Image (spheres, grey):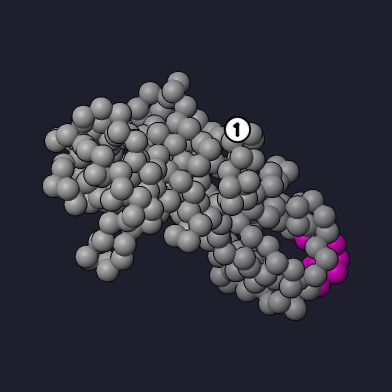
Amino acid sequence: MSQSKKNRLDRFISQTLFERDPSRPVSKKQVRLLAAQNRIFVDGEPAKSTGQPIDFFSRIELDGELLQNNWPLYLMLHKPVGVVTAATHEEHKTVIDLIDHPHKDQLHYAGRLDLNTSGLLLLTNDGDWSTALTLPDKSVEKCYEVELARPVTEEYVQAFEQGIWFDYEGVTTRPARLEILDDHHARVWLTEGRYHQVKRMFGHFRNEVVKLHRSSLGSLKLDPVLQPGQWRELTLEELLALKEEGAPFQRQTSR
Ligand code: URA
């Protein structure tokens, strides 16, 4: 079952039993009978109606046998340079390759980083959560540390604040904050995530980004304990803070 899609209980039971034994299809009517006999449990409770909505994290049992039992996963990874944000890649190691977790095959990333960008990358199996974090209209603020080939000047601060025209998409970027740290270093906060956005914004001034590192996403900071390539699960406090910022997470289902 897809990680963000809702499903109906009867459809899920019929599909799952059919996948297990295609020679014995189970109709919706038969599923209704199973429910009436109290043989189907959803999250530990007897099924109320076979039309009841379920999702990827609903725990489904039939005759005491688990048909589905997915546990929500929320991870932060310190993405190193040279690792690609993709599930599979012919040439490069992927961010998923860096995760040693029994359910890593369920993971996808919430917002990508370029091959040569390092820093905070979120991975999850909760499609609603990653969508909420990356929605273009209410995306949380991301902070990047930038090293530049040429000196950065005050002129940039105003241009970033006003927005920069992106010819390819035909849009002006949303107001972005820029803090100049020294001649060649700056910090920038974006509330959107367009293709190569930071590089293209500095590219407007013909100034090449030579190093790019994402240090935070909303209130969530990359844990300084994590070395490049290391990851950990988000804490409940971190999840609650991101919920306040518009990304509700899944209740924990009982295993
Ligand atoms: N902007 C970029 O140019 N690259 C990234 O990886 C992230 C933001």
Horizontal relation, residue 122 to residue 23: left or right:
left
At 67% across and 70% down in the image, what residue appears? 8
Within 10 Å of disc 1 (Cα), the crowding (few <14, some 14-19, many 20+) is few
* Residue at which label 1 appears: 235
Q: Nearer the viewer, residue 162 or 106?
A: 162
Q: Nearer the viewer, residue 88 or 81?
A: 81
What is the secondary structure assignment of the residue under circle 1?
loop
Location of residue 255 by image quarter: top right
**Residue 183: x and y, percent?**
21, 29
Q: Nearer the viewer, residue 156 or 92?
A: 156
**Residue 192: x and y, percent?**
40, 54
**Is residue 14 in sight in this rendering?**
no
Q: Can you name the residue that lies furthest to the right here?
A: 37
At 44% across and 23% down in the image, what residue appears? 224
**Residue 180: x and y, percent?**
30, 33
At 60% across and 32% down in the image, what residue appears? 235
Horizontal relation, residue 178 to residue 50: left or right:
left
Judge whether residue 39 is colored magenta: yes
Quarter of the image where the N terminus is located: bottom right
Vertical order, 1 against 101 (above or below): below
Amino acid on which the number 1 mark rests in the picture: Thr
Q: Nearer the viewer, residue 163 or 254?
A: 163
**Is residue 154 in sight in this rendering?**
yes
Location of residue 91 by image quarter: top left
* Magenta range: 33-40
Vertical order, 222 against 58 (above or below): above
At 46% across and 46% down in the image, what residue appears? 141
Horizontal relation, residue 229 to residue 237: left or right:
left
Vertical order, 29 against 147 (above or below): below
Horizontal relation, residue 231 to residue 213: left or right:
right
**Residue 117: x and y, percent?**
28, 39
